[in-house]
Image (cartoon, rainbow, N blue to C red):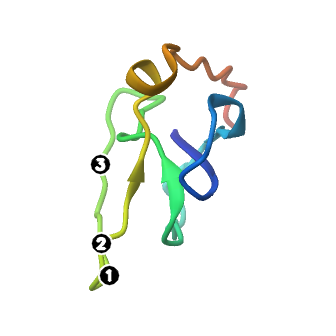
Amino acid sequence: MALLARPGDDVTPDDFRGVRVDGSCGVHIDRGVAGAPAAFPVGERLAFDDKQGRVHACVSVSFVAEFGVYLSVPLAPAG
């Protein structure tokens, strides 16, 4: 599970969506796309093979520090 929002640095918690990645394919995140600082496993473990381009442009969000909230993402069963 990863939390992503539209490109830009003026996002709010309402802009974020949980993205389930089952590991059967890769994921490309364009530059400028806001994301939570970590991915969250829905199973017992999580492994990433992370490859950065020549320019590392990351827009990170700290929900507690910036907005005073935690996010909750309801998880439907996989499948």
Type of the residue with mark 3: Ala
Compute the Cα span from label 1 to label 3. 19 Å
Report the residue at 48% width, 29% height from top: 42
Give the side of residue 56 with respect to residue 32, left or right: left
Q: Do the residues labelled 2 and 1 touch (CB within 8 Å)?
A: yes
Q: Which residue bears the numbered disc 2? A: 56
Type of the residue with mark 1: Gly
Asked which quadrant contains residue 20, the reply is top right
Q: Position of residue 17 (x, y in %)?
A: 67, 39
Report the residue at 52% width, 39% height from top: 1
Compute the Cα span from label 3 to label 2. 20 Å
| 24 or 50: nearer the viewer | 50
Dot 3 or dot 2: first in sequence order is: 3
Q: Which residue bears the numbered disc 1? A: 53
Q: Position of residue 64 (x, y in %)?
A: 42, 18
**Nearest-to-viewer mark from 3 and 2:** 2
Q: Position of residue 38 (x, y in %)?
A: 36, 40
* Quadrant position of the C terminus in the picture: top right
Dot 1 or dot 3: first in sequence order is: 3
Compute the Cα span from label 2 to label 1. 6 Å
Type of the residue with mark 2: His
Q: Which residue bears the numbered disc 3? A: 47
Mark 2, Cα crowd under 10 Å, few <14 / some 14-19 / many 20+, is few
Q: Is mark 2 on a helix, strand or loop?
A: loop
Q: Is mark 3 on a helix, strand or loop?
A: loop
Mark 3, Cα crowd under 10 Å, few <14 / some 14-19 / many 20+, is few
